[in-house]
Image (tube, rainbow, N blue to C red):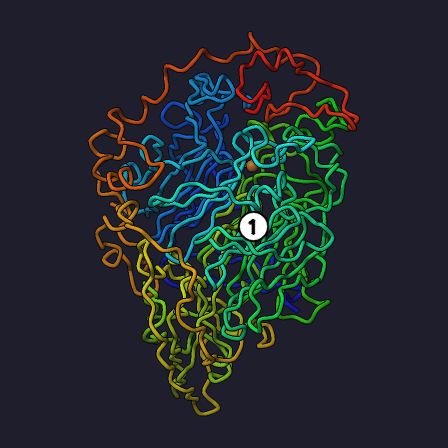
Amino acid sequence: MLLTTTPLVAAAWLASSMVQPAQAVTAGSIVNAGNTTVSAMMMFVGNSQKVYILDKAEGNAAQINGHPAWGAVWDFNSHTSFAMDVKTNVFCASGMHLPNGSYATFGGNGAVTVGGNIGSVTTDGGSAASFDATYQDYDGRKSIRILNPCTDDDDFTSENCQWFDNPDVLSMQKERWYSAAEPLGDGTIVLIGGFVNGGYINRNYPNTDPTYEGGAAEPTYEFYPANGRTAEIMQFMVKTSGLNSYAHTYLMPSGKMLVQANYSTMLWDPSTNTETDLPDMPGQVVRVYPASGAVAMLPLTPANNYTPTVIFCGGTNMTDDQWGNYSWPVIDTFYYPASADCQRLTPEPLDGSTPAYEQDDDMLESRTMGQFIILPNGKLLVVNGGENGTAGYSENTDTTTQYSQMPYGMSLAAAPVGKPALYDPNAPKGSRWSNDGFSTSNIPRLYHSSAILLPDASVLIAGSNPNVDVNLTTVFPTTYEAEIFYPPYFSASTRPVPSGIPNKLTYGGSYFDITLPSSSYSGNANDAADNTTVVVIRPGWTTHGMNMGQRYLQLNTSYTVNDNGTIAIHTSQMPPNPNIFQPGPAMVFVVVNGIPSNGTFVIVGSGNVETQSTSAAATLPTNQRASTDTSGTGSGSSSSSSDNGASSSHTGAIVGGVVGGLVALGILGALIGICLSRRRRAANRAPNATAAYAMGDRKNPISAPSPYSAGAVGAGFGAAAGGGVGSKELPADPYYRQDYNASSDWNTSNVALTAAPPMSPYHDVPRRENGMSFDVDPYSADSQMRTGTPDGGRRYR
Ligand SMILES: [Cu+2]
């Protein structure tokens, strides 16, 4: 099938200069990819060279500016990394691209110190901290951090290559851990739900306040940029209370958003905050954190008329009374098999039929924390995770009440799955999964691991840290070693080297020609043209088994095959509806006979947060074939044409014009400051057209000289600060001055942490209500009251 049992070794794929798998690689193999400096809880591919990595604030050995690092950047060519400074605690944040190719990450935890304890400068009556003197992290719960990816041509010590991370200037309206993030068609990012202070699941037991949980749950959504729009309650967050963080969110062509959490599903209209119920998840399998199923939108193609179908695989069918509460689960999750179940849902069927879940093939093994990586050939890889349990960590469960008896340390999952699996959405049912010829990694990739598609179409795998702080000796330790998985197409000895890929794609309009020289393929030229696709992939922002924003779209194409074997691929622009593929950065791959080129970075849309202009798609020329004996000159490829994931050239109808439902936009003065205040420079720096990545000016994303100095913030973020609801006034003082005069420090002398009963790493109140078997109550009512928390004594931290 996909792999021969004796994988061929590919010689160096002589592609553009931007990627260089210098040594031969073996298809199906998993190889070491160096050290990530910090544990890779989150990653995104910034450009053809750099992958940006974020960890929670914890005691990593790597230091930066006098404190442990929790940010890093990893280099694609050298497989080396170095630390980057991040000010606020990005623990379990969400993230998304911006239309100009920058990235933003939203929310996180308050400031913590050693052992995940509350930092030294406390707030909120002692239940959180704004800063910690040891780790030197700031409260990240409202943070919006912006990064403009840089390359080796840039000065990484300059502020323009650093994270902009200043909540006094730029922040969300609400505190959010584990929020969902999904862009609208104009590039606005919607942030949904989340914990206020973290926890295992987002509810108390019994669940008497499903909306707010006494202040521990955040049931609202908000927009970034806000542009006057205030945070509003999303009723679906109440309905799905508890199992609703990191909700699965996918914008649909109509402008409505598929939202899936707990075992509920809906379509949400962001312009009116109205909800349309869709069917419940069959079997009540939970897919969101901490069940953490693998979820992805299947490829959008001309053949399916760009109709989104979302696949949900794995997670767990644990029942309501097994889940527990903020602190920990009732059952020993690490012994409880995760789900292998897969379901597909087409939320907006083209024929107008009622949406319904459709049973798909089970995965090859049960998996929690698996994640889908969409490959250029239209197949989906699942990597990472475990066969048992859930995400999250704890020092105990209701069943195993002593940390010393926890069999896997703090991990609530076990039986790591080290072997990737490949899903072919177009294969007949019953044969969609395979892993033949794939290596098995011996590195567990459990909670807080990540994976993402690289520009050479390999897959970077990193992270894993089911521990409250760095722990290198436990059974599932804090992991810094990265690996790369080489999918089956790495057995090919010739890769396509296309030219003529633009650095920008529009929504509709003129087609363009991509040229494939005869050296880009082997075998018959007409067959190669028939089996060529041009695909746009957004690898997304990876964390917690998700790749937020990940999408795959196959462009409409036709071809002219010349008698010298050169193939011109006439390629349409994006479908003229930005809801199908939101504006922002992406990679374009040309896939011939199932073998992808390297990815070329492009910007889809205008680069700004604004209503995207659209136009009708130009008609493609009809196919022109060469004489039948014309062949490519590339070395033989091991992939047969039946294994290509490509479909014949497509000139079918394109989805029509802009669908209604876009949020009516007010004045977008705000964040557009970030997007507009750039100078065009990338084109000058790009070595050639195919290697170009049109990301605007990476060095000067913000017009200010320094976002960290008082004068500068006004220049760069003035519009933002003055515009949106929830934006703060420009501070008179720079960032570092925030909240040093808060109340007295929390320390171990006034809270008996050494008391025998276990304490949740999330420091929540243990469940002790009637009906439960839990009989340890470390926090008497009196001691809770002494914490002075405003919600009647609950200890959410
Ligand atoms: Cu997390």
- Foreground residue among 129 and 542: 129
Whether residue 636 is visible here, answered yes or no, is no
Pointer 1: what residue?
248
Query: Which amino acid lies under the numbered mark 1 shown in the image of this protein?
Result: His
64 vs 210: above or below? above
Quadrant of the image containing the N terminus:
bottom right
Q: Residue at x 66, y 49 (%)?
A: 263
Left or right: residue 340 compared with residue 700 = right
1 vs 388: above or below? below
Q: Residue furthest top?
A: 749
Q: Which image quadrant is residue 711 in?
A: top left
Q: Residue furthest bottom?
A: 627
715 vs 270: above or below? above
- Foreground residue among 197 and 38: 197
The image shows residue 377 at horizontal and vertical percentages of 53, 67
Q: Residue at x 41, y 49 (%)?
A: 189
Tell me if mark 1 has few (under 14), some (14-19) or many (20+) residues whose alpha carbon lies within 10 angstroms of its own.
many
The image shows residue 370 at horizontal and vertical percentages of 62, 49
The image shows residue 92 at horizontal and vertical percentages of 52, 37
| SS under mark 1 | strand
690 vs 156: above or below? below
- Foreground residue among 397 and 694: 397
The image shows residue 18 at horizontal and vertical percentages of 37, 57
Q: Which image quadrant is residue 223 in?
A: top left
Image quarter for ligand 1: top right
Q: Which image quadrant is residue 488 in?
A: bottom right
Residue labelled 1 has its Cβ within 8 Å of some atom of ligand 1: no
Left or right: residue 333 compared with residue 462 = right
